[in-house]
Amino acid sequence: MNSKRRIGLDIGSASVKVSVFEGDGKHARFVECREFDLTEEGILNEGELYRGLHDWLAGQKLLDARVCVGIPQYLATTSLADFPPAKPSQLGSLVEQEARQMGDFTDEHFLHGYVSVKSGFGRNNPVLIGLCREEVVREKMRALDTAAIPCDNVSMSGMAVVNTLLKLHPECLNDTKPILILDLGKMNSTAIVLAGGQPLFIGSMSFGGEAFERAVREKVTTHKSLAGSGEANIDTMLAEADLTQESQHSDMWRVAKSLDSEIQNVVEHWRSQEREELSEVPIGRVFLCGGASRVGGLRKWLEDAFEIHMEMLGPEIGGEVRPEFAVAYGIGLESAETAALPLSLLPPEIVAIKHRLKRFPIAVCAAVVLLLSILGFELSILRRCNGMMEEMSHYEEQLGQCDALIRKIDDTVGASVKLEQLMTPLAESVNRSGRVIKALDVISRSCAEDTWFYYLADAASYRNWGGYETHPDDLQDVGRRARKVQKDQKKITVGIFETGLGKGSTATDVEFPNILHAKDVRNEAAMVGAGFTTMTDKAGYSDALKRVGELTAKLSDKTVFGRVDTMEDVSEGARTDVSKPWTEFLLKNKSVHAMPFTLRMPYAEPEITQE
């Protein structure tokens, strides 16, 4: 694609007009305008139009240029809104809300574009918003894409005329009097009111130049002397006609009168919705453009009707102003990015892509600067590292001496550890008895009158005695763990027993085979105690359970034991042989109800602290 050549496409019903520019921005230069006549090519439908346009552009060597296509103004709408002062990012959000409100009258999706204009006439921050149905824009772009014609931008024909005026007549940008622009096309027309650089009104008119063509054909049919005139002669007759000499009863005069009436209605409509600062100000200048503006005598006829001088608007080609190329010229300005009021209707995803591509050279420059900065930084780091390497070589020698000293320290520490290990059994034997005595004292003070222990041992021996493996929790102080309970253990450790043992009675001495002396207690983390608490009857089970809870709370005072809790998990080393003699004894005595319990009592602190 030729990035230097830009063209604007004005696709009409009878022809496609093209404006060609070289360069973009301030360096853009107008080259020429060309026309692709659809009538001469015999094009009948839209598909043939775009295929024929592709071949014609290829023949004109314009297919590699960047293209901006125009949307007819009757398919779009504009609004001049005044917003409060805002940053560009905030202004975009405000415009989007305004555009959404403009499109709320239908369920269709709309695309919008906007451009800020000069303040004035009571508008402090005026913004011109353009709105068009999304399907119209995408259908136009799909048709061009199907015909392999690249489309880089989409503009409105009304805005194209405004940009043409501001480019060819820059003094109009500061003219505070309203300026009326009439773009008279073959099928429809557009009326534009501009003042102080603000497009105050852009509206469509139903008038089309084909009405003059029908009047001429009617005249040819009526007058036998004109019979046999072809389409080419019709165009010639229109150009050579003189409306000022037409009779008020002629078809040409009636068409011109309908145009006059529609222009008056458009101006009145604009004045009715304009601010007071401009609603009563007379029109200062009038410009005519479009193919129908070349009808012979139309300009003079309108001047007489409106009593104001009218000027032709269009690029000058071969020393002659060509008003039929006014729209194409303005679209070309948009394509060349030199329009005074650029307003694009591209879909947002394409706008984002164009924005990235536009900033790509800046990104490349930034990347080059970043790479050079990184290279310079790395060179400075390299120089610094070389100096540090020399310094580190000196440190390495000193570290070698330190290494030898560290080995000697390690040997000394190892010998110290061995001595500590030899002293550990002695420390355990000294602390064990006192610790167990303190535990027994706390247990005796914590038991209520109707609660007693019949078994006390360290947790590891409790589990190991019957051939069970020592549980890891018995070697360290851990929190309570949820455990499953087997049915057979529930029958032994949980329940209500009716016995003949009353309050204050003592059990028959039974020879318990499993006895563990205090001096034989190993360095363990917890103790296990089993006992009973009496109940008045079976209904007193909750009270007994409460007393067991109170007992565990008293034992958990952090002086000797940590968090004391009941042992409900009998699947990991329960001792049925310990509880069996007492259970059998209590089952034979039915005068008292008793509930068994088993407690795991972890020590608050380890027996020996190693630091």
Image (spheres, rainbow, N blue to C red):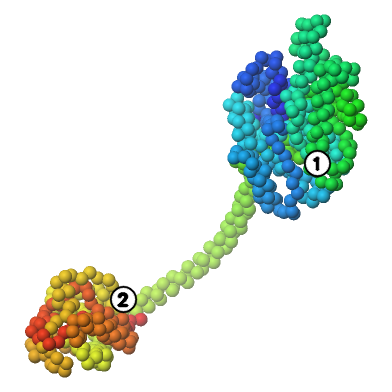
Q: Is residue 296 visible?
A: no
Q: Nearer the viewer, residue 540 or 611?
A: 540
**Distance between mark 2 and mark 1 Cα atoms:** 85 Å
Answer with mark 2 or mark 1, whichever residue precedes in sequence: 1
Where 590 sits versus 172, above or below?
below
Residue hosting label 2: 479
Residue hosting label 1: 272
Residue appearing at x 68%, y 41% in the figure:
113
- Residue 267 x %, y %: 82, 36
Q: Quadrant of residue 31?
A: top right
Q: What SS does tag 1 mark? A: helix
10 Å crowding of disc 1: few (<14), some (14-19), many (20+): few
Amino acid at the residue labelled 2 = Gly
Q: Nearer the viewer, mark 2 or mark 1?
A: 1
- Residue 401 x %, y %: 44, 73
Count up the numbered dots.
Answer: 2
Q: Which mark is residue 107?
A: none
Residue appearing at x 71%, y 21% in the figure:
15
Q: Nearer the viewer, residue 215 or 362?
A: 215
Q: What SS does tag 2 mark? A: loop
Q: Quadrant of the N terminus?
A: top right
- Residue 492 x %, y %: 14, 77
Left or right of 219 in this view: 462: left
Q: Quadrant of residue 14?
A: top right
